[in-house]
Image (cartoon, rainbow, N blue to C red):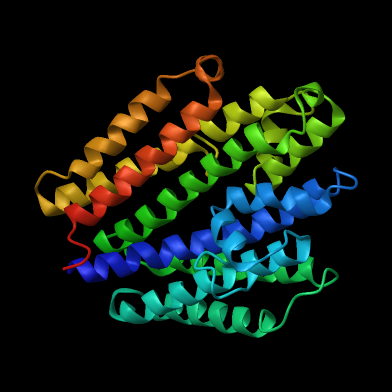
Amino acid sequence: MLGRTANGLFWMYRYLERAENTARLIETGQRIALTRLGQGDEEWGSVLQSAGALTGFDDAYDELTKDNAIDWLLRNLDNPSSVRSCIAAARQNARMVRTAITGDVWSATNAAHMTADRILARKVSERDLPETLRRLRENAALVRGVTLGTMLRNDIFDFLRLGTFLERADNTARILDVKYYVLLPSPSAVGTSLDNVQWESILRSLSARGGFRMEYGARGGPREIAQFLLLDPRMPRSMVFCIKKLCTNLSYLRREQDGMIPALDLAEAMRSETLSCSIDAIFDAGLHEFLQDAQQRLAAITRQIEIDFRFYE
């Protein structure tokens, strides 16, 4: 496969995953802001930080308000990570690799783009925001479902899965990191109803609330939530689950390429070190440090994949 084709597949699905994650993050920001009476606007700074969009926002806007933050994250084309920008970029990459994807995948991606362009053409009112976010999430999920139902399990499929799980792992790390260091107003709030509501919102943002309640019932707290989102191999958005999928798809690519893939070595090293940790060890050493290290490792894996498969040749 040409490196440019692999690059297009990788980023097509990374952008789709990012669009869905950002839509969920906006919904979570609304829920969390409701728990902070009188500080609704300031709360959106942590949401922007979680999305990695705070610096760009500060350059574009003079004032941090809820409306400005939502507009920047949802529909502003000057933000390359906004939902609208990501869906447009995914569609552009899909157009470049049309011969590598099925007609159904192209149709679903193109429909998602047209829907996003239509419903995000104007500023979304607070009343319409929940329905808008739901439709955006469903369109992204439809592309993913059509992909799983129609694509051959070959090297094409491996590259699109790499993009999906790298983006998903990075999103999980970012959300947990911001919760631990930014969302909590003061140490005295730890263990209070305010703290619990915010952790509940984090589970919702990662589509993990149902699974967590099935596993822990009503007894789970912050430590159990971190365990679930980082180390539970059954949870499809956990760090461990995503890393295992990276290793699996890179292993398939190595067999087809019949050569060494340094990116696989990086992923396997991350997998073994992550899986060898307990949540108690992570908290004792520092959750923030663990998550920062995870994000750096994921960035290194991404750079190595680009080198290994000659994405820009």
Tell me the quadrant of the picture where the C terminus can be found. bottom left
Q: Is residue 285 left or right of residue 192?
A: left
x, y percentage for residue 172? 54, 43
Tell me the quadrant of the picture where the N terminus can be found. bottom left
User: Image quarter for residue 4?
Assistant: bottom left
Q: Is residue 243 visible?
A: yes
Q: Is residue 148 visible?
A: no
Q: Residue at x 72, y 52 (%)?
A: 44
Q: Residue at x 65, y 85 (%)?
A: 118
Question: What residue occupies the far right of the structure in this picture?
Answer: 37
x, y percentage for residue 74? 64, 68
Q: Is residue 31 left or right of residue 109?
A: right
As drawn, 311 above or below 240: below
Q: Residue at x 29, y 80 (%)?
A: 99
x, y percentage for residue 21? 58, 56
211 or 286: nearer the eye? 286
As drawn, 197 above or below 19: above
